[in-house]
Image (cartoon, coloured by chain):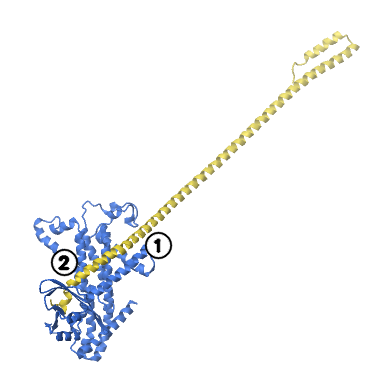
């Protein structure tokens, strides 16, 4: 077996070397497969997954926060609107209440006025009656005095009755 | 930094190579560039030492039985008296048989450039350790040590639950991720995970083997056709073992939709193409790595040619551009070390991808697959089935070699 040392030697693959190398490379492949690439690629994948899920989670959280913010804003607007409404209602009802109170007071005053007027009328009638009686008595007394001096009492009575009859039945 | 190292290396290399022509002038020894670039049964640490490697020879003796001859060194094998030495002299092979002749060859160091021939029987297989085997094993050892250590880091949780730390981890992680995302995923598709360990192992072994070629006294194991052939063989076997039905149908029956009478032409072309692809894969890496070494030797050799033709003073002047060019080539080699590791891995992934690809005629268009989960990391968007659907194999045409 002659192997030329020059150019041909470069191009001739040594079969024994191939056997060694296949063996060695096979062992290397197995060792690295078992002890190196497995853990490394798994770790890389796991880390990528973790980063990926972290970003996803962060994005999701951001979206959620935005949603919540939006919700909050809507809620606040709603609350403000409601407050306004309540205030307006309160104002309206206060106004109505005041109006009502006023009306009641007016009514009461009117009632009192009427009552007072009725009272006055009644008092006036009483007083008139009293005055009539008083006048009658006074006339009788006066007539008696006159009669005692001038005429008999029969003529006097007639005069007095005529006088009373001439008085209006009911004068205000 | 790298420039400094390479420049230093170039100067050191030039320094160690300089004494050789003086020897050549004194004796009849010549500078054997090819011998340096080629494989050999020794580790060259000139001018300090030349370490001979063990010889293991599987032989068939005169009776037709297989025997194994194990010797510590080539010289030891020759001194045992069981072998003749065949050396080349003036372009013709010459067999040295007598002990005195052989001792003379050992004395001059020629025995390392010759070949052994048993006095009885013949050599079946030469399992001898060679320089490229040693540096290849060294590259494997470095690969194994680095990545087992790296894996331990990941196991401890650094890089798993927390961010990776340090140059060591980040450097190699970047490369691993590159091979995974830029090489394996786009070329193989959904099944990439099964082939990733092979691609990573091949990538880093080739890379470290290539880089050993840049180290002083080192040699690139990948500048040996046996080693690149072994790697291509792995790619070939993996592709065929995991090959899909469609792959073999395509290979043995020709492409679909082709008239029957074209098939007899296309089938041999397909089969031939399958083998040439992988052969080209082996030769591409081998030739690239060998060429770098040869170019450097040639550029430095210019100094000595100038010395012979124009004299010593011109040779000193010529050494300046020569060394500058060598530095440049070394930088190119550094680049090539990475590029070739990438190219080999890329093409391996491509060939494996072609072999394992399964055609789905009713495959939905990618836009229909949008699940509205955003563009974050598609394969994690849900229950994991997304990956299966999303990563469609994109197999470009095989690159012409």
- In the rendered image, the residue lying farthest to the left is B261
- Tell me residue B129's x, y (percent): 22, 75
Q: Residues within 10 Å of mark 2 (few under 14, many from 20)?
A: few
Task: Give the Cα separation between the discs numbered 2 and 1.
Answer: 46 Å
Q: CB atoms at circles 2 and 1 under 8 Å apart? A: no
The residue under label 1 is: B162
- In the rendered image, the residue lying farthest to the right is A149
Label 2 chain ID: B
Specify the colour of chain B. blue
* Same chain check for tags 2 and 1: yes
Q: Is residue A118 left or right of residue B42?
A: right
Q: Quadrant of residue A161?
A: top right
Query: Would residue A17 be seen by someone viewing this image from the given angle?
Result: yes
Q: Quadrant of residue A159?
A: top right
The residue under label 2 is: B276
Q: Secondary structure at mark 1?
A: loop
Label 1 chain ID: B
- Tell me residue B16's x, y (percent): 27, 84
Q: Is residue B322 left or right of residue A138?
A: left
Q: Nearer the viewer, mark 2 or mark 1?
A: 1
Chain identifier of the yellow chain? A
Q: Quadrant of the N terminus of chain B?
A: bottom left
Is A62 drawn above or below residue B293 in the view shown? above
Given residues B102 and B297, the one toward you in this image is B102
């Amino acid at each position: 077996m002659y192997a030329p040392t020059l150019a041909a030697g470069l191009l001739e693959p040594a079969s024994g070397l191939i056997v060694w190398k296949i063996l060695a490379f096979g062992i290397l492949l197995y060792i690295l497969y078992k002890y190196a690439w497995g853990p490394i690629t798994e770790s890389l994948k796991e880390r990528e997954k973790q980063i990926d899920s972290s970003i996803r989670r962060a994005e999701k959280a951001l979206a959620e926060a935005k949603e919540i913010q939006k919700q909050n804003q809507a809620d606040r607007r709603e609350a403000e609107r409601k407050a306004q409404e309540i205030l307006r209602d309160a104002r309206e009802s206060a106004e109505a209440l005041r109006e009502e109170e006023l009306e009641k007071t007016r009514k009461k005053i009117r009632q009192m006025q009427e009552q007072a007027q009725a009272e006055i009328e009644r008092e006036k009638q009483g007083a008139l009656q009293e005055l009539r009686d008083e006048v009658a008595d006074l006339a009788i007394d006066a007539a008696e005095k006159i009669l005692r001096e001038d005429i008999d009492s029969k003529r006097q009575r007639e005069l007095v009755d005529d006088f009373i009859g001439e008085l209006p039945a009911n004068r205000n | 930094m790298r420039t400094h190292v390479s420049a230093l290396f170039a100067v050191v290399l030039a320094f160690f190579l300089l004494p050789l022509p003086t020897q050549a002038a004194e004796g009849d020894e010549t500078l054997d560039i090819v011998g340096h670039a080629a494989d050999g049964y020794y580790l060259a640490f000139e001018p300090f030492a030349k370490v001979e490697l063990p010889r293991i020879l599987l032989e068939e003796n005169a009776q037709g039985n297989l025997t194994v001859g194990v010797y510590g060194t080539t010289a030891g094998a020759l001194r045992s008296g069981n072998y003749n030495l065949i050396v080349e002299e003036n372009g013709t092979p010459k067999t040295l048989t007598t002990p005195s002749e052989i001792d003379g060859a050992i004395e001059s160091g020629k025995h390392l450039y010759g070949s052994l021939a048993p006095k009885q029987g013949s050599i079946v297989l030469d399992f001898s350790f060679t320089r490229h085997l040693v540096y290849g094993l060294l590259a494997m050892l470095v690969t194994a040590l680095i990545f087992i250590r790296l894996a331990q880091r990941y196991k401890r949780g650094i890089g798993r639950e927390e961010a990776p730390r340090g140059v060591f981890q980040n450097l190699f992680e970047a490369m691993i991720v590159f091979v995974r995302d830029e090489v394996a995923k786009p070329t193989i598709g959904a099944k990439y995970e099964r082939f990733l360990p092979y691609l990573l192992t091949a990538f880093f072994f080739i890379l470290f083997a290539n880089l050993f070629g840049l180290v002083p006294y080192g040699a690139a194991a990948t500048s040996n056709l046996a080693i690149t052939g072994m790697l291509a063989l792995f790619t070939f076997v993996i592709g065929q073992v995991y090959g899909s039905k469609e792959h073999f149908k395509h290979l043995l029956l020709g492409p679909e939709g082709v008239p029957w009478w074209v098939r007899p032409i296309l089938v041999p072309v397909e089969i031939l193409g399958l083998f040439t692809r992988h052969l080209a894969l082996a030769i591409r890496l081998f030739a690239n790595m060998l060429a770098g070494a040869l170019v450097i030797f040639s550029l430095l050799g210019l100094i000595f040619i100038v010395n012979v033709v124009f004299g010593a003073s011109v040779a000193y002047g010529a050494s300046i551009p020569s060394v500058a060019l060598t530095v440049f080539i070394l930088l190119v080699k550094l680049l090539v070390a990475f590029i070739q590791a990438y190219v080999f891995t890329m093409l391996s992934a491509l060939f494996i991808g072609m072999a394992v690809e399964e055609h789905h005629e009713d495959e939905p268009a990618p836009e229909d697959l949008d699940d509205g989960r955003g563009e974050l990391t598609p394969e994690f968007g849900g229950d994991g089935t997304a990956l299966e659907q999303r990563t469609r194999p994109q197999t470009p045409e095989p690159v012409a070699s």
